[in-house]
Image (spheres, coloured by chain):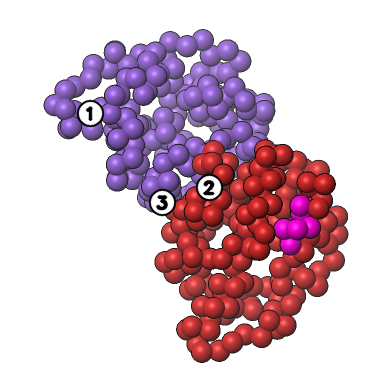
Chain colours: A purple, B red
Amino acid sequence: MDGVLADVYAQFLEMHLKETGERIPEKSLLGVPEHIAFPLIEKHVRSKGFFRTVKVMPSAIPVLEELNRAYEVYIVSAAMEYPNSLLEKYEWLQEHFPFISWKQIILCGSKYPIHTDIMIDDHFKNLNVFQGNRSFLYTQPHNELADTGKHQRVRNWQDLADLLLA
Amino acid sequence: MDGVLADVYAQFLEMHLKETGERIPEKSLLGVPEHIAFPLIEKHVRSKGFFRTVKVMPSAIPVLEELNRAYEVYIVSAAMEYPNSLLEKYEWLQEHFPFISWKQIILCGSKYPIHTDIMIDDHFKNLNVFQGNRSFLYTQPHNELADTGKHQRVRNWQDLADLLLA
């Protein structure tokens, strides 16, 4: 979800601005881990409403709706470290992706025991232990400078549509 | 969780008694699906506190603590149909099984994409699509009369200790 369906960077930037009056320059985020780029991140992700009000990534809704017709889709989110996010994440999916049923949602700690054929993720820690066929690195500032290794980089949902719905 | 770690039958019986004054005879539960045995089940599982206050299955705590030393344990619960249960289930695990970290918890809709070597469950719908090596049917009244098929029946947590910790 975060960094793929949910535009958490927009939320981090906005909350940082609101709390400190300081606008973090976007180019300072490139290649920097999120917990270093956003010094208030732990407070912000634990604050009520963070996940419930995050913006949807551009084009995620129409592309995922198409993918959901063509594939067996699961939304897998490593949410368990932030237990107050669990209901917020469920409600956020219900609001923006009503075509995703509760049967397709998995909120976990580690993604390791969840086996699928394809994974789309922005974090190497999840992609590198994935055992399926195709792994896509969804571009986010923290991974933008990294060598993708065996994973295929996608810059946005349109890239995913081109690759998976062609 | 439900029917394996959590004694949901005790909770169903108590809530039915409290609401109707009627005590459901335990022998009437044998071989009967839960939603038929407990006509108020949908209301009760959706009521605040149902999962937070359910009793722990006898011996589940010490045996799971030992299993957690010997195996890579995941607690997988099909909770997503009842989104208000998500936080309650997390808090319940924290209270009774503090040795289980958030990294080991998976709250899902379908258990199908979660792959492990061993599964312990009380429902055939989960066990029958399981792709690992050993599947244990945890005895609950609804499955007590059923032929276990390829699964191995365990009556309680002591049985699991004998089979998995010997």
Disc 1, disc 2: CB below 8 Å?
A: no
Q: Chain of mark 1?
A: A
- Amino acid found under the numbered disc labelled 2: Pro
Chain hosting mark 3: A
The picture places residue B154, in percent across and down from the top left corner, at: 78, 60
- Give the Cα separation between the discs numbered 3 and 1: 24 Å
Note whether residue B40 is visible: no
Q: Is residue B133 visible?
A: yes
Q: Which residues are magenta?
A: B156-161
How far apart in space, not on screen, are marks 1 and 2 (Cα)? 34 Å
Q: For mark 2, what is the residue? A: B98
Q: Is residue B52 magenta?
A: no
Residue displayed at 81% across by 43% down: B133
Q: Quadrant of the N terminus of chain A?
A: top left
Q: Is residue B4 above or below residue A86?
A: below
What is the secondary structure assignment of the residue under circle 2?
loop
- Dividing the picture into quadrants, the one containing residue A28 is top left
Q: Which residue is mark 3?
A: A87
Q: Residue at x 50, y 50 (%)?
A: B94
For disc 3, the neighbor class at 10 Å (few under 14, some 14 to 19, many from 20) is some
Compared across the picture, whether A47 is left or right of B39 comes to left
Q: Amino acid at mark 1?
A: His
> x%, y% of residue A50?
31, 40
Q: Nearer the viewer, mark 2 or mark 3?
A: 2
Q: Is A98 in front, or is B118? A: B118
User: In this rendering, which labeled residue sits more in front, label 1 or label 2?
Assistant: 2
Please state if B29 lies on the left or on the right of A109 as rendered: right
> Dot 1 corresponds to which residue?
A16
Residue drawn at x 55%, y 27% as measured from the top left: A126
